[in-house]
Image (spheres, coloured by chain):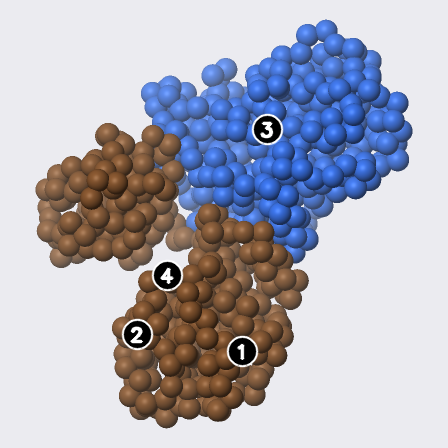
Chain colours: A blue, B brown
Amino acid sequence: MKIEWDRAAELLAAAQNLIIVTHVSPDGDAIGSLLGLMWVMRQLGRQVTPAVDGGVPPALRFLPGAEEVLAALGEVTPDLVIAVDCGDAGRMGQAGVAASASGAPLINLDHHASNTLFGTANLVDPATVSSTELILDWLPRLGGCLDTRIATCLLTGLVTDTLCFRTDSVTAAVLGKAQRLVEAGAPLSEITQRTLLTKPFADLRLWAETLHTVQMEEGVIWAAIDRQTRDRVQATDNGDAGLVSFLVTAEEAPVAAVFREKDDGRIEMGFRAKPGFDVGRVAVALGGGGHVLASGATIDGPLDVAIGRALPLLKQAAKGERAVG
Amino acid sequence: MKIEWDRAAELLAAAQNLIIVTHVSPDGDAIGSLLGLMWVMRQLGRQVTPAVDGGVPPALRFLPGAEEVLAALGEVTPDLVIAVDCGDAGRMGQAGVAASASGAPLINLDHHASNTLFGTANLVDPATVSSTELILDWLPRLGGCLDTRIATCLLTGLVTDTLCFRTDSVTAAVLGKAQRLVEAGAPLSEITQRTLLTKPFADLRLWAETLHTVQMEEGVIWAAIDRQTRDRVQATDNGDAGLVSFLVTAEEAPVAAVFREKDDGRIEMGFRAKPGFDVGRVAVALGGGGHVLASGATIDGPLDVAIGRALPLLKQAAKGERAVG
């Protein structure tokens, strides 16, 4: 944890033209943070260009300002770059490369414990459930105030990163913050419906096909999806989101994993643990990152080789070997 | 809505020995209300016997006091009966019959809009998301205060009836109440885990097998499960709970159905609709019942015949033909 409020305030005081970027394959917290902070900074009189590689996923286009987000950054000359919800500089993708090329200072705002503190100023607080919660904490220091647009964006990150208050990280204070955001006009039910409770039929078929491969061994439940199946059901890029959280509901399994063969043949892996267990270290051991209870990594395929590499580590994690290290 | 606080207070002032009962096939709100109110009344110096036909389901036995709940009532002589979360007197089952036989007055505490106001005093507020929320509202009038046991029981009803804050009944005030309950010591994450996020691996396999049969036609998404498959995966009786709600998340389908072949060869059908559509009438047409958005029926098999009978009605419902009737 490193929260350099003063250093960030200095950088911001000297800046008029901001670029805000977030991570590739953006989720609700990424886009919620990007747009929430955009509206805050505009309230404070700054000019803001929001960008994320590939643009805003369809399910998040209901957020106010989504239509302004650039899917690619050309040559830019900002006074300041703010990266939100990025654990390391590489997560910003091409947008980060373009922003860095400008030579502008960078504020790194994030809540991942694995954050590499890559900013000129770092606002990194792993105790927050989402990067949007951290923005809400920042708001009074900035002299900003909640409006419906800001509240809607910030609640979206809070809802998606906690699966609507279902994760272990949700405290009374988080519920109190959610209450404030709803009071400020954020439509909780609509956010939940759009981000967590609606999926294309093709994605539902992806779930069906993936679940059909489910196996359990020594406390690890896992499922895998290959390219052929993904192509056949024509699921969206993010179609298996939530599946690994679903698997970890199996009462016999403290640890869950989903393995997904990407178009380039590499294997994307998502891990989840029940409270008291640690899959963060498994991800790190495989060159990935994340949290104790939710992490991921991408390694070389083919599928069976990747599974063979990850499975022993996951089984160790399922034995609760977190306390040893 | 009929909230007779004063009449209830009079009945309570005259009573020392209470029986509290709730509905058959009790859910989290039923048991949470039963035990939450038991601890409140004991705090107020009353003797309390809690009862529910068949006892407390395993998933809810973590609640404080669950071991005291009687699974059957013999001859009893209470001063006062309190029925919680029961829409009508029949919902109390045999426990209600025994309690009524005593001739004691009855407080009917409930949040169902369809409540028949069967009490000597009625505390019925459909604006509350759960009966436990209504008990929390009652608490200051009673002069009671929250402790960890009471808060745990009350939060359980709030979590299960809102699927952990996912229903559109959840307001800022509800989040504020949840915050108070967590501050009083209620373990939100444990409650969510135990009531909503844990299923036996065998049930997860039932989901996998059932989802593998998923089809969609004319706005209706459905899946079916036969006896052989159920037997093979050895799922629990209630193993497909939640599956039809999962299906209705498909964005192209306003209507969802799950067909399950029972041991006697009859077909149990669960229906769900998105807001604005009506599967209640479909269930009624097939001899079943329920609500506009959630209903069910049981008809003769075999599976394909039952599906063939229900599907045209479901397709009509998916066209939004509710407005016609």
Q: Position of residue B18 (x, y in %)?
A: 44, 86
Q: Disc 1 is attached to a residue of which chain?
A: B
Q: Compute the Cα span from label 2 to label 3.
A: 49 Å
Badge number at residue B113: 4
The residue beneath circle 1 is B39
Q: Nearer the viewer, residue A55 or B322?
A: B322
Q: Tell me which amino acid carries mark 3.
A: Pro
Q: Position of residue B277 (x, y in %)?
A: 30, 41
Q: Earlier in the sequence, mark 2 or mark 4?
A: 2
Q: Residue furthest top?
A: A75
Q: Which residue is mark 3?
A: A64
Q: Nearer the viewer, mark 2 or mark 1?
A: 2
Q: CA distance from mark 3 to mark 1?
A: 46 Å
Q: Quadrant of residue A73?
A: top right
What residue is disc 2 on?
B89
Can residue A109 be seen here? The reply is yes
The amino acid type, in three-letter code, at marker 4 is Ala
Share a chain, discs 2 and 4? Answer: yes
Q: Secondary structure at mark 2?
A: helix
Q: CA distance from mark 4 to mark 3?
A: 36 Å
Disc 2 vs disc 4: Cβ atoms closer than 8 Å?
no
Residue at (74, 26) in percent of width and height: A42
